Image (spheres, rainbow, N blue to C red):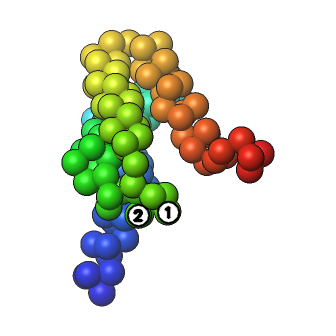
Amino acid sequence: MIKTVIAAVVSNYGLTFLVIGFIASAVAIYRSPRPVSRAVVVDKLLTWFVVFNIGVMYLANFIFHVFFGGMAAAFIGWPDSPFQVEVGTASLGFSVAGFIAVLGGFDRRLVAVIGPGIFMLGAAAGPPARW
C-alpha cells in the first residue's frame, strides 16, 4: 500500500503540490491575527498556490523535461523530442516568475498565474487538429 501511495503522490505531483499548498494556506490563515478577513484568506490561498503550484511544480517540470526528457515524454504519451528542452525552459521561467511574485504583492502573484494557466489550457486542449 505504501508503494501505491508513493507512486500516486509522485505521478500526480500537480495535485500533490495543490494539497501541500492548501495545508500551508490553512496554517498561515490559522496563524493570522484575529479576526481574519476574506482578503487575508484569499491572499494566503493565492500566495501558497503560487509557491507550490507555480514555483515548485514548474521547477520540478523543468527538471523532468530537461534532464529526464525521455521519461517525461513517455509519461505524457508523446515521443521524446528536442522540444522537451523548450518546454523545460518555459517551465523554469514560470517557476522563477512564481518565486519572484511571492516576494511582491497580491497583483504580482495574480499575474504570475496567467502564463502557466494559459500554458496548461493549451496543453489540455492539445494540437489544433483536436479542437
Q: Are marks 2 and 1 in contact (CB under 8 Å)?
A: yes
**Percent x, y of residue 69:** 31, 52
Residue at the (32%, 61%) spot, across then down: 71
Helix, strand or loop status at disc 1? loop
Amino acid at pointer 1: Gly
Quarter where residue 102 is shown: top left
Farthest residue in the bottom direction?
Answer: 1
Q: Amino acid at mark 2?
A: Ala
> Which x, y percent locates residue 97?
34, 21
Neighbor class of circle 2 (other Cα within 10 Å; few <14, some 14-19, many 20+) is few
Mark sitting on residue 77: 1
Tell me residue 46's x, y (percent): 44, 30
Spatial CA distance of label 2 from label 1 is: 5 Å
Which quarter of the image is occupied by the C terminus?
A: top right
Rendering quarter of residue 90: top left
Q: Is residue 80 left or right of residue 96?
A: right
In the figure, residue 91 lies in which quadrant?
Answer: top left
Q: Can residue 65 be seen at all in this image of the molecule? A: yes
Residue at position x 32%, y 58% in the image: 70
Residue where numbered disc 2 is placed: 74
Please indicate whether residue 124 sits to the left or right of residue 75 in the image: right
- Could you tell me if residue 29 is visible in this image? no
